[in-house]
Image (cartoon, helix red, strand yellow):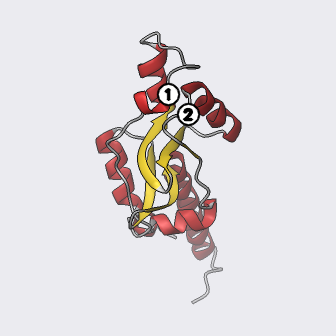
Amino acid sequence: MEATAAANATVEAILNVKGREVWSVPPDTTVFEAIRLMAERNVGALLVMEGDRLVGILSERDYARKVALLGKNSRTTPVREILTPALHTVTPRTTISECMALMTDKRIRHLPVLEGDKVVGVISIGDLVNWIIHAQAAAIDQLQAYIAGGYPG
């Protein structure tokens, strides 16, 4: 896959590889419990859901800026007080390059993936970078095979 093809691939392709598991908490969860879940699952953000409805996202950055620096107590502060409500979302049909542009422009690291109003996954900047690295490696392998005369065609 060449670099252009990698950038034109869609979020669906990433979700097909990484899976569609979503870690979330309700808004009344304490920040401490949310941070504990992030550590257990080795993720940098959690979706905040009221039932099936996405109401925000909580990231390690939110914790650092809105709890630690302000001296709030993570064991008593509910997630609803520090979540980021203004969400930027994508669909499974959004391209990798569109995601990269959105993340760069908005300075965000996680994008919930929605199909209509239903959450179907989450992608991170790391997911995008890994996708591009693997795509570039595949393109290099194809070029090396072509140069060595092993290219079929």
Q: Is residue 103 left or right of residue 59?
A: left
Image quadrant in which you'd find residue 151: bottom right
Which quarter shows the C terminus? bottom right
Q: Residue at x 49, y 25 (%)?
A: 63
Q: Is residue 54 left or right of residue 17?
A: left
Q: What's the amino acid at mark 1?
A: Pro
Residue 29's disc is: 2
Residue 105 visible, this orientation: yes
Tell which circle, 2 or 1, labels the residue nearer the N-terminal end: 2
Q: Which residue is mark 1?
A: 78
Check contact, mark 2 vs mark 1: CB within 8 A. yes
Q: Residue at x 59, y 19 (%)?
A: 75
Q: What's the amino acid at mark 2?
A: Thr
Residue in the foreground of this view, choosing between 52 and 148: 52
Q: Residues within 10 Å of mark 2 (few under 14, many from 20)?
A: some
Image quadrant in which you'd find residue 85: top left
